[in-house]
Amino acid sequence: MNFINVLAGFELGLGGIVAIVVVAVVLILVIALVAWYISTMNWFRRTKVKVDEANSGIDVALTKRYDLLTKALASVKGYAKHESETLSKVIGMRTGNIKDLSLDEKSKLNAELNEVQRGINVVVEQYPQLKADTQFSLLQNQTADCEEQLQAARRVYNSNVSTFNQRRVTFPSSFVAKRIGFREDLEFFKADEEKREDVKFEF
């Protein structure tokens, strides 16, 4: 009789152990899922911050380039009034704060600045004395550096956007993205289709 009672108790104990193991496994899975969800949610938010920072870098570079080209136009006016007035109209069409523009508007502004820069290069070629001017030469170098900074900021921005968009549409992270409000791809900063090469000063 005692042997049967011991055996029954052992079986009950084994069933209890199995139940505990099952509960533990379920709890571990739940904890792992919650941890993954939080980690994925934080990744999206961190990457969005990186995208915003890179967008801010584009704003800074565009603003600096705009200011430098405006100064360059002031220098050109003394040499080629008609050409400088035409370019001034292009650059003068842009009013307001650059950071308030949409990404598409920033792309268009960049294309407009490319046109202004090309126009200035043409004027410089026509007036050797302008090309020889030390201050103007310094301004050209600063503008070229600014163009490189803008391209670098654009590459960083587009790289972050690409990473974000890929993960946003890939299951299962797409589930988290929708839950926290990221339902659409982020927009790329596009180079002007016809002028994808970096603008270069011609001396």
Image (cartoon, rainbow, N blue to C red):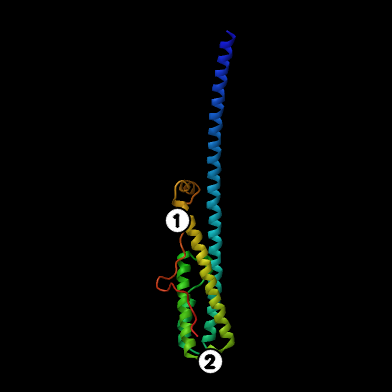
- Image spot of residue 28 (x, y percent): 55, 36
Q: Which residue type does callout 2 highlight?
A: Gln
Quick one: SS at disc 2? Answer: helix
Cα separation between marks 2 and 1: 50 Å
Q: Which mark is residue 185?
A: 1
Q: Which residue type does callout 1 highlight?
A: Asp
Pick the residue in front: 182 or 13: 13
- Image spot of residue 147 (x, y percent): 52, 74
Q: Residue furthest front?
A: 3
Residue found at x 56% / y 31%: 24
Q: Which residue is mark 2?
A: 129
* Image position of 44 with respect to 61: above or below: above
* Image position of 113 with respect to 45: above or below: below
Which class describes the residues within 10 Å of circle 2: few (<14), some (14-19), or many (20+)?
Answer: few
Q: Earlier in the sequence, mark 2 or mark 1?
A: 2
- Image spot of residue 97 (x, y percent): 54, 69
- Image spot of residue 95 (x, y percent): 51, 72
* Image position of 117 with respect to 30: above or below: below
Residue found at x 49% / y 46%: 176
Q: Is residue 52 left or right of residue 174?
A: right
Image quarter (top left, top right, bottom left or bottom right) of the N terminus: top right
Residue found at x 49% / y 87%: 124
